[in-house]
Image: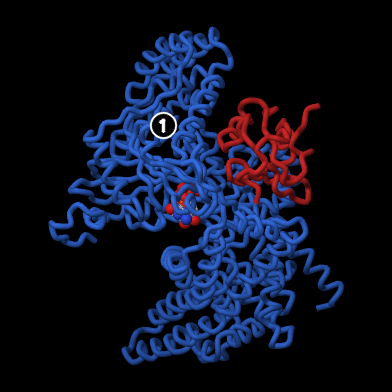
C-alpha cells in the first residue's frame, strides 16, 4: 500500500519516493530540498493538520494538501534511524 | 574610512579590510560590477552591508529583500559597484522577487557573481550554484554561516568544494565580518581575469535538444542582439516558459539588459518578435516534453554528489534541540496562538508605558516652552501677526505635535519589532495563522506581508512580491491596509489612553490602553481575513494554491546593531516623512482657519458642513476634515485634529492658540478634545476609523506601482474607507440605542 506523509506519526523519519504533483508544482518543493530519495520527518502539525517537516536539517511548513502528495516509505528496521533530525 | 596602514602588514587580512573605502550609494561609473546572489536567508544583505557600510535591512526569514539594492566601495584603487539581490532558489523564477534576482544574474552583465551559500544546507544551496555556473565562468562562492555549521556539527572543506566546483570558494561568517576581505580580494581577481576558473558543468542535453538550440540561438541573437545569455533564453523558450515568452512578446527582454545610464534599446519590431516565438514553437514540436525535467534531475544528483564530496565526515551532527523546544511552544496547537497575542500585547504595553514620559517631556519642551518662547520672540521683534501665526501656530505647532506624539512610541516599537524579526519569530507567526489564511483563500505568506504592514503599509505592499500566485498577491496587496501601521498607532495609543485607559483605575490604565490597542490591531487582522475571504469568493475567485515556507533556525538578535539601525533608519526616516507632511499641513490648517469668507473661517464652513455626516458616524466634522488633510500621511491626524479643534471651537478662551498647550500634555489634549464635544463614542469610533480608512498617499502610489492597475488601486483605496463608514455608522447607532449617549 502506498503511504502518504499525513499518515506518518510525528517524529518518524521516512524516505520520500515520489512527489505526486505536476512538475511546475513539484519543482518549488525540490528546490527547497524535498527530493525523491531524501529523508523527511514530520516534526509538528498545526491545529488544522498542516505539517512542519524537517528535511536536510531545515524546517519547512507545508499545507496539508501538499503533504498529501508526498509518497513516502518507511525505513527498514536495520536502516539508519538515528538521523540528523532526531532531536 | 581607510586608514593608512604601514607597508609591513600589507598582506594581513586586517590591512585588506582597510584597503576598502566605502563609497555608500551607487556611483555613476564603476570598474567592477558584483552581483550578490543566493538562496533566501543566507546572509546576502549582511555581506552587502559589511562591504558597503550601508544598512540594507536584514532579517531572519526568507524573503526579507524583495528589491535590488545597490552600493559601492573602492577596493585596491578600483570602484566596485555591488548589487544585493532578493533570494532565489533557482533561475526558474516563480515570484516577482525571484524574477528580480534572476533578471539581474542573467541580464545585468555582472563582472562577477558572488553566490552566498548556507553552509548548513549545502546540498540545497548548490542547485542554484550549479545553475549559475552553467551561464558564467566568473563566479565566487561565499560559504557563509560557518559558525552555525560548526555549532551543529556540520563540517565542510572549502578546498574540496572549490576543487569540485571549479570556482573559488571563500568560507566565512558574514555577521562577524570573517572572510569578507578575502571574498572581495578573490572577486576582484576573478573579475580581472587574474584567477582562472573552470566551472563544473553538469547539464548535458540530448543531441536533438542541442540541435534545436543551435537553430533557435541565431534567431534570438538576431532579434535581441543586446541580450546576454541568449542560449539560456533559447532553452527557456523551447521549454515553453511563459514568463520568458511574455518578455519576448512584449519586448521587455531587451530592456532587462540595459543598465541605468545606457540609452534604452529600442524594442524590436513586432514581426521580429513574432518570428522568434514561432520558431521556438515549431522547434518544440520535435522535442520530448520532459527534456527539461531530465536535465534538472541530473543537476540535483550532481548537487548531492558535490555536497557529499565536500563534507567532512566523522563529525557528530548536533540537533537543533533548543529550536525544537522553543518551536514546541511557539507553534503549539494550544499555546501558539495565545503566546502570539501575549507577545503582541507586551510589545504594545512596553511601547505605551515607555513612551508616556518622554512624550510629555517633548510636548512640554517643544510646545509649552518652545512655542511660548518663540511667540514671545516674534512679538518682541514686531513680526506681523499673520506671518507669526502662519509660521508658529501653523507650521511649527503641527511639526512639534508630530515629533512629540510620534517619536517616543516609534523609537520603542521599531527596535522591539526588529528584535523579534531578527530572532526568527515572523515565519512562526505565518505558520500559526496559515490555516486562517487558507480558509480565506489567501496565500500563507500573506502573514509575513501583514507583519511588515505593522511597520509600514507601503513596505508591506512591496513585500507581497514573495507571493508567487498573482491572484493571492493581489489579495495581499488590497488588504494590507488592515495592518495597523506605525503612522496610525500613535493615534490609537493616545486616544486609548485618554478615553479608555482613563476608565480604569490609574494603576491599570497602561494595561487597559494596551489591551484596547491590541484589540484594534486584532480587529484589523480579522478584517483582513474577512475581506480576503470576500475577495476570493467574488472578484478574485480562486482556491488557495500550495506553498511551502521555510522556518529558519532561531538566531540570537544583534541587540546593539538592531537598536542603532532601527532608530536611525526606520524611526528617523518615518519621523522625517511625518515632519515633511506635517509642516505644509500645519500651514494649510492655519490658512483655512484664518481666511474668512462670509462671516466665518473656511475651516468653520468645512467643519460645519462635514459635522452632520461626522456625527452620524459617531465622529465629528473636525475628524473628517482632519482625515482629508491627512491623506498624504496618517501620522498627522492627531495634530490636525487638535489644531482644528483649538482653532475652530476657540476652546482656548480668547487668549490665542498657544496658551492652550500650557498644561501637561495628555491632560491638555484631553481638555481640548472634551471641550470640542468629544465623548467616549467619539474616541472609540476614531480608533475604528483610524484602522478602517483609505491608505496614505505613499501606499496608494506603491499599490499602483506594484499592480500597474488603476482598477485595483481604486479598490484598495475605497474598500477600507467604505468598511470604515459602515462600521462607524453601525457602532454609533447601536451605541445610541443602548447607551443613549
Ligand atoms: N550566525 C550567523 N548568522 C548570520 C550570518 N550571516 C547572516 N546571518 C543572519 O542571517 C539572517 C539573514 O541574513 P540576511 O542578510 O537578511 O539574508 P539574505 O540572504 O539577505 O536574505 P533574503 O533577503 O531574505 O534573501 C539574519 O538574521 C542575519 O543576522 C552568519 O555568518 N552567521
Ligand atoms: Mg537580503
Q: Is residue B310 above or below residue B249?
A: below
Tell me the residue at 35%/54% (across/down).
B178
Quadrant (top left/top right/bottom left/bottom right) for the N terminus of chain B: bottom left
Q: Is residue B527 above or below residue B540?
A: below
Q: Residue B385 in the image: x percent, y percent?
A: 40, 84
Tell me the residue at 51%/82% (across/down).
B358
Q: Residue B9 in the image: x percent, y percent?
A: 18, 57
Tell me the residue at 47%/11% (across/down).
B279
Residue B66 can be seen, yes or no: no
Dividing the picture into quadrants, the one containing residue B265 is: top left
Q: Residue B32 in the image: x percent, y percent?
A: 26, 41
Q: Nearer the viewer, residue B217 or B324?
A: B324
Dividing the picture into quadrants, the one containing residue B261 is: top left
* Residue bearing the label numbered 1: B132
Farthest right residue in view = B738
At mark 1, the secondary structure is: helix
Dividing the picture into quadrants, the one containing residue B712 is: top right
Q: Is residue A55 above or below residue B461?
A: above
Note the chain letter of the red one: A
Q: Residue A27 in the image: x percent, y percent?
A: 59, 30
Residue B392 can be seen, yes or no: yes
Q: Would you say A79 lies left or right of A9 here?
A: left
Dot 1 crowding, Cα within 10 Å, few <14, some 14–19, many 20+: many
Farthest left residue in view = B7
Total labels: the figure holds: 1
Note the chain letter of the blue one: B
Quadrant (top left/top right/bottom left/bottom right) for the C terminus of chain B: bottom right
The numbered mark 1 sits on a residue in which chain? Answer: B
Q: Nearer the viewer, residue B711 or B141?
A: B141
Q: Nearer the viewer, residue B22 or B537?
A: B22
Amino acid at each position: 500500500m502506498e503511504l502518504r506523509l499525513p499518515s506518518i506519526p510525528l517524529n518518524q523519519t521516512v524516505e520520500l519516493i515520489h512527489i505526486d504533483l505536476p512538475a511546475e508544482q513539484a519543482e518549488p518543493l525540490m528546490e527547497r530540498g524535498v527530493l525523491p530519495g531524501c529523508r523527511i520527518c514530520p516534526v509538528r502539525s498545526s491545529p488544522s493538520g498542516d505539517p512542519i517537516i524537517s528535511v536536510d536539517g531545515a524546517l519547512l511548513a507545508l499545507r496539508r494538501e501538499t503533504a498529501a502528495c508526498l509518497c513516502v516509505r518507511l525505513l527498514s528496521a536495520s536502516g539508519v534511524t538515528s538521523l540528523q533530525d532526531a532531536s | 574610512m581607510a586608514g593608512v596602514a604601514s607597508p609591513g602588514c600589507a598582506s594581513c587580512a586586517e590591512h585588506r579590510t582597510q584597503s576598502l573605502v566605502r563609497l555608500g550609494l551607487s556611483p555613476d561609473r564603476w570598474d567592477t560590477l558584483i552581483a550578490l546572489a543566493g538562496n533566501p536567508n543566507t546572509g546576502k544583505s549582511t555581506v552587502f552591508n559589511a562591504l558597503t557600510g550601508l544598512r540594507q535591512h536584514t532579517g531572519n526569514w526568507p524573503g526579507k529583500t524583495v528589491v535590488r539594492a545597490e552600493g559601492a566601495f573602492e577596493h585596491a584603487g578600483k570602484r566596485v559597484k555591488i548589487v544585493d539581490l532578493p533570494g532565489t532558489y533557482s533561475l526558474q523564477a516563480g515570484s516577482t522577487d525571484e524574477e528580480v534576482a534572476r533578471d539581474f544574474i542573467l541580464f545585468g552583465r555582472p563582472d562577477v557573481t558572488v553566490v552566498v551559500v548556507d553552509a548548513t544546507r549545502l546540498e540545497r544551496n548548490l542547485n542554484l550554484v550549479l545553475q549559475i555556473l552553467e551561464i558564467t565562468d566568473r563566479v565566487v562562492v561565499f560559504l557563509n554561516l560557518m559558525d552555525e555549521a560548526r555549532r551543529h556539527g556540520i563540517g565542510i572543506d572549502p578546498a574540496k568544494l572549490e576543487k569540485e566546483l571549479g570556482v573559488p570558494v571563500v568560507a566565512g561568517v558574514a555577521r562577524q565580518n570573517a572572510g569578507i576581505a578575502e571574498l572581495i580580494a578573490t572577486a576582484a581577481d576573478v573579475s580581472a581575469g587574474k584567477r582562472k576558473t573552470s566551472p563544473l558543468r553538469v547539464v548535458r542535453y540530448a543531441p536533438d535538444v542541442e540541435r534545436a538550440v543551435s537553430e533557435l540561438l541565431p534567431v534570438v541573437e538576431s532579434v535581441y542582439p543586446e541580450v546576454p545569455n541568449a542560449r539560456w533564453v533559447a532553452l527557456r523558450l523551447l521549454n515553453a516558459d511563459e514568463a520568458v515568452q511574455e518578455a519576448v512578446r512584449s519586448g521587455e527582454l531587451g530592456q532587462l539588459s540595459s543598465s541605468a545610464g545606457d540609452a534604452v534599446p529600442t524594442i524590436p519590431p513586432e514581426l521580429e518578435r513574432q518570428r522568434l516565438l514561432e520558431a521556438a514553437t515549431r522547434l518544440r514540436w520535435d522535442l520530448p516534453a520532459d527534456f527539461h525535467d531530465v536535465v534538472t534531475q541530473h543537476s540535483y544528483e550532481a548537487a548531492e554528489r558535490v555536497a557529499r564530496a565536500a563534507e567532512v565526515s566523522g563529525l557528530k551532527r548536533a540537533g537543533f534541540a533548543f529550536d525544537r523546544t522553543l518551536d514546541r511552544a511557539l507553534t503549539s496547537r494550544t499555546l501558539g496562538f495565545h503566546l502570539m497575542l501575549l507577545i503582541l500585547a507586551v510589545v504594545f504595553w512596553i511601547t505605551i508605558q515607555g513612551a508616556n514620559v518622554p512624550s510629555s517631556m517633548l510636548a512640554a519642551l517643544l510646545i509649552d516652552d518652545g512655542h511660548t518662547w518663540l511667540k514671545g520672540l516674534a512679538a518682541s521683534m514686531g513680526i506681523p501677526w499673520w506671518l507669526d501665526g502662519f509660521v508658529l501656530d501653523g507650521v511649527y505647532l503641527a511639526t512639534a505635535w508630530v515629533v512629540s506624539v510620534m517619536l517616543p512610541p516609534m523609537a520603542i516599537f521599531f527596535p522591539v519589532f526588529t528584535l523579534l524579526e531578527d530572532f526568527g519569530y515572523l515565519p512562526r507567526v505565518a505558520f500559526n495563522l496559515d490555516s486562517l489564511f487558507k480558509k480565506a483563500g489567501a496565500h500563507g505568506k500573506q502573514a509575513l506581508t501583514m507583519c511588515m504592514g505593522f511597520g509600514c503599509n507601503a513596505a508591506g505592499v512591496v513585500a507581497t512580491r514573495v507571493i508567487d500566485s498573482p491572484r493571492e498577491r493581489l489579495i495581499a496587496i488590497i488588504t494590507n491596509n488592515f495592518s495597523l501601521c506605525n503612522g496610525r498607532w500613535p493615534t490609537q495609543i493616545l486616544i486609548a489612553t485618554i478615553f479608555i485607559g482613563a476608565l480604569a483605575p490609574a494603576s491599570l490604565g497602561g494595561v487597559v490602553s494596551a489591551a484596547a490597542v491590541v484589540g484594534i490591531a486584532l480587529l484589523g487582522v480579522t478584517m483582513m481575513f474577512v475581506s480576503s475571504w470576500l475577495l476570493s469568493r467574488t472578484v478574485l475567485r480562486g482556491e488557495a494554491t500550495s506553498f511551502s515556507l521555510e522556518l529558519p533556525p532561531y538566531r540570537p538578535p544583534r541587540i546593539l546593531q538592531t537598536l542603532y539601525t532601527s532608530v536611525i533608519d526606520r524611526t528617523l526616516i518615518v519621523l522625517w516623512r511625518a515632519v515633511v507632511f506635517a509642516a505644509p499641513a500645519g500651514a494649510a490648517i492655519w490658512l483655512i482657519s484664518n481666511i474668512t469668507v462670509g462671516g466665518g473661517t473656511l475651516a468653520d464652513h468645512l467643519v460645519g458642513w462635514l459635522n452632520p455626516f461626522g456625527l452620524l458616524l459617531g465622529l465629528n466634522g473636525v475628524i473628517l476634515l482632519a482625515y482629508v488633510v491627512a491623506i498624504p500621511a496618517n501620522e498627522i491626524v492627531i495634530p490636525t485634529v487638535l489644531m482644528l479643534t483649538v482653532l475652530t471651537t476657540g476652546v482656548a478662551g480668547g487668549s490665542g492658540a498657544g496658551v492652550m498647550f500650557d498644561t501637561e500634555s495628555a491632560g491638555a489634549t484631553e481638555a481640548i478634545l472634551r471641550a470640542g464635544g468629544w465623548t467616549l463614542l467619539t474616541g472609540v469610533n476614531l480608533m475604528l476609523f483610524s484602522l478602517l480608512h483609505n491608505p496614505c498617499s505613499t501606499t496608494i502610489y506603491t499599490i499602483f506601482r506594484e499592480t500597474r492597475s488603476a482598477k485595483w488601486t481604486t479598490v484598495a483605496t475605497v474598500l477600507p474607507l467604505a468598511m470604515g463608514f459602515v462600521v462607524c455608522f453601525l457602532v454609533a447607532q447601536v451605541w445610541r440605542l443602548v447607551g443613549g449617549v
